[in-house]
């Protein structure tokens, strides 16, 4: 999976985690915090923070801190980051077209509905477990 994630963006020397963060940031052009990004990616906040710092050094993302306070500032993509995000989205579409070519639209919709239901139920279960353990 990691090879598929990084295919097409090799010249940027990105890891699968970089690619995932760029993809998620592209879904949130208004910007999101490191905490939100970590939650969406299902990754450790410290690991995502390091990844974001790396993306900033690569000039693919920036912290939007107009008042000078960057703590909890939203992370946004730069123009270069947006270009890479477009390549990533194109690759994802290509992969889905190839692996799902024998699946009807109805089957695909059913699959995503089922997957969404399972994800929601897992999220509710995790919330319940966390509340019970407090």
Image: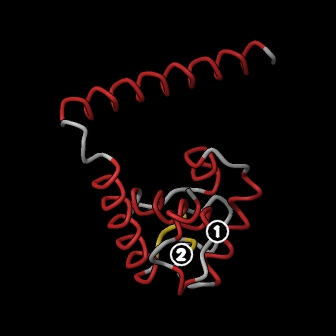
Indicate left or right for 10 with 109 as reference. right
Indicate the secondary structure of the residue bearing disc 2: strand
Q: Is residue 129 shown above or below 100?
A: above
**Image location of residue 18, percent across then percent down:** 59, 67
What mark, if any, has residue 72 been given in the picture? none
Name the residue rendered at 61%, 17% in the picture.
125
- Is disc 1 surrounded by few (<14), some (14 to 19) or many (20+) residues within 10 Å? many
**Mark 2 and mark 1 residues within 8 Å of each other at the beta carbon:** yes
Distance of label 2 from label 1 (alpha carbons): 7 Å
64 vs 10, nearest the viewer: 10
Name the residue rendered at 74%, 59% in the picture.
47
- Which residue has dot 2 on it? 61
- Protein image colouring: secondary structure
Q: Quadrant of residue 28?
A: bottom left
| Screen quadrant of the N terminus | bottom right
What mark, if any, has residue 52 been given in the picture? 1
- Is disc 2 surrounded by few (<14), some (14 to 19) or many (20+) residues within 10 Å? many
Indicate left or right for 92 with 62 as reference. left
120 vs 105, nearest the viewer: 105
Name the residue rendered at 34%, 32% in the picture.
112
**Image location of residue 36, percent across then percent down:** 58, 49
69 vs 35, nearest the viewer: 35
Indicate the secondary structure of the residue bearing disc 1: helix
Name the residue rendered at 19%, 36% in the picture.
104
**Image location of residue 102, percent across then percent down:** 24, 42
| Screen quadrant of the C terminus | top right
Q: Is residue 102 shown above or below 125?
A: below
**Image location of residue 13, percent across then percent down:** 61, 81
Say how many tags the image has.
Answer: 2
């Amino acid at each position: 999976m990691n090879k598929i994630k990084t295919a097409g963006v090799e010249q940027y020397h990105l890891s699968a985690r970089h690619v995932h963060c760029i993809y998620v940031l592209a879904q949130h052009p208004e910007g999101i915090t490191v905490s939100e990004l970590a939650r969406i990616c299902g990754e450790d906040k410290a690991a995502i923070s390091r990844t974001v710092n790396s993306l900033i050094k690569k000039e693919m993302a920036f912290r939007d801190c107009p008042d000078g306070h960057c703590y909890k500032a939203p992370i946004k993509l730069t123009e270069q980051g947006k270009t890479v995000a477009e390549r990533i989205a194109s690759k994802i579409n290509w992969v889905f077209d190839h692996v799902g070519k024998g699946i009807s639209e109805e089957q695909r919709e059913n699959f995503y509905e089922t997957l969404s239901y399972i994800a929601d139920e897992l999220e509710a279960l995790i919330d319940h477990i966390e509340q019970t353990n407090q």
